[in-house]
Image: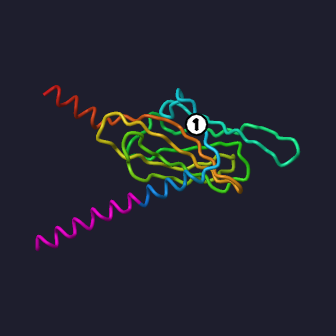
C-alpha cells in the first residue's frame, strides 16, 4: 500500500477524533449553561461504597407567598465496588415532579474518558433504572463524578456524585512485576 495513502488515512482518523472531541466538549458546555439548578452530594459520600443523596432548593414564587422546599435525588450503583468493563445497575429516586427524562453521565475527574451517558427508564416503583459501563484506565485509581441530569417540564436539574474505581489489572501487573 502507498505510504501517502496510509498517512492520509491516519491523519483523517486523527482529525475525526479531534473534531468529535471538540463537538462533544461544545455540547457539554452548552448543556451546563442550560442547567437551572445544580446540587452536589456530600463529599464524604462515595458511590463506590453506598448510595448518595443530593438536595435541590426549590423556590416557588407562583403565589403571593414565596415557598421554599427541598427535593432530593438519590443515586445508587450496584454492585459495589463498581466494576470496570462490566455492566452495573443504576438506580435514581427523586422527589422532583413532572420528569421527562433522567440521564446519568460519567466523567473522569483527572482524565477525559470520552462520552459515557445512560438514559434511565421509569419503573412502576417510581425509581429510574438502567445499566452503565465504565472504561478501564491506565492508572490504578480513577476519580469520577456521576452527573444525574433530570429534565422536568420546566427546568433542567443536575446533581453530582463522586466515586473512585481501582484498576485491578494495573494492580495485578504491578504486583507481578515487583515479585519478578
Residue beneath label 1, please? 40
> Can you tell which quarter of the image residue 31 is in?
bottom right
Note whether 159 is above or below 12 in the view shown.
above
Residue drawn at x 41%, y 42% is 108
Pick the front one: 85 or 34: 34
Q: Specify whether residue 103 is painted magenta.
A: no
Q: Is residue 58 left or right of residue 137?
A: right
Residue projecting furthest to the left: 2
Note whether 32 is above or below 1 in the view shown.
above
Note whether 124 is above or below 13 in the view shown.
above
Q: Secondary structure at mark 1?
A: strand
- Quadrant of the rendering where the C terminus is positioned: top left
Magenta residues, as a range? Answer: 1-22
> Can you tell which quarter of the image residue 74 is in?
top right
Percent x, y of residue 83: 41, 40
Percent x, y of residue 158: 59, 46
Percent x, y of residue 90: 54, 44
Amino acid at each position: 500500500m502507498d505510504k501517502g495513502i496510509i498517512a492520509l488515512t491516519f491523519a483523517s482518523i486523527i482529525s475525526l477524533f479531534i473534531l468529535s472531541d471538540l463537538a462533544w466538549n461544545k455540547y457539554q458546555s452548552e448543556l451546563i449553561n442550560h442547567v437551572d439548578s445544580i446540587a452536589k452530594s456530600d463529599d464524604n459520600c462515595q458511590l463506590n461504597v453506598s448510595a448518595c443523596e443530593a438536595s435541590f432548593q426549590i423556590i416557588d414564587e407562583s403565589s403571593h407567598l414565596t415557598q421554599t422546599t427541598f427535593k432530593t435525588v438519590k443515586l445508587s450503583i450496584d454492585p459495589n465496588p463498581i466494576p470496570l468493563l462490566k455492566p452495573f445497575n443504576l438506580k435514581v429516586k427523586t422527589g422532583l415532579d413532572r420528569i421527562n427524562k433522567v440521564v446519568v453521565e460519567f466523567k473522569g475527574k483527572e482524565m477525559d474518558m470520552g462520552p459515557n451517558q445512560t438514559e434511565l427508564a421509569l419503573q412502576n416503583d417510581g425509581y429510574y433504572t438502567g445499566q452503565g459501563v465504565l472504561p478501564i484506565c491506565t492508572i490504578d485509581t480513577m476519580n469520577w463524578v456521576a452527573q444525574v441530569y433530570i429534565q422536568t417540564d420546566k427546568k433542567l436539574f443536575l446533581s453530582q456524585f463522586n466515586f473512585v474505581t481501582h484498576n485491578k489489572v494495573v494492580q495485578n501487573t504491578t504486583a507481578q512485576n515487583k515479585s519478578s
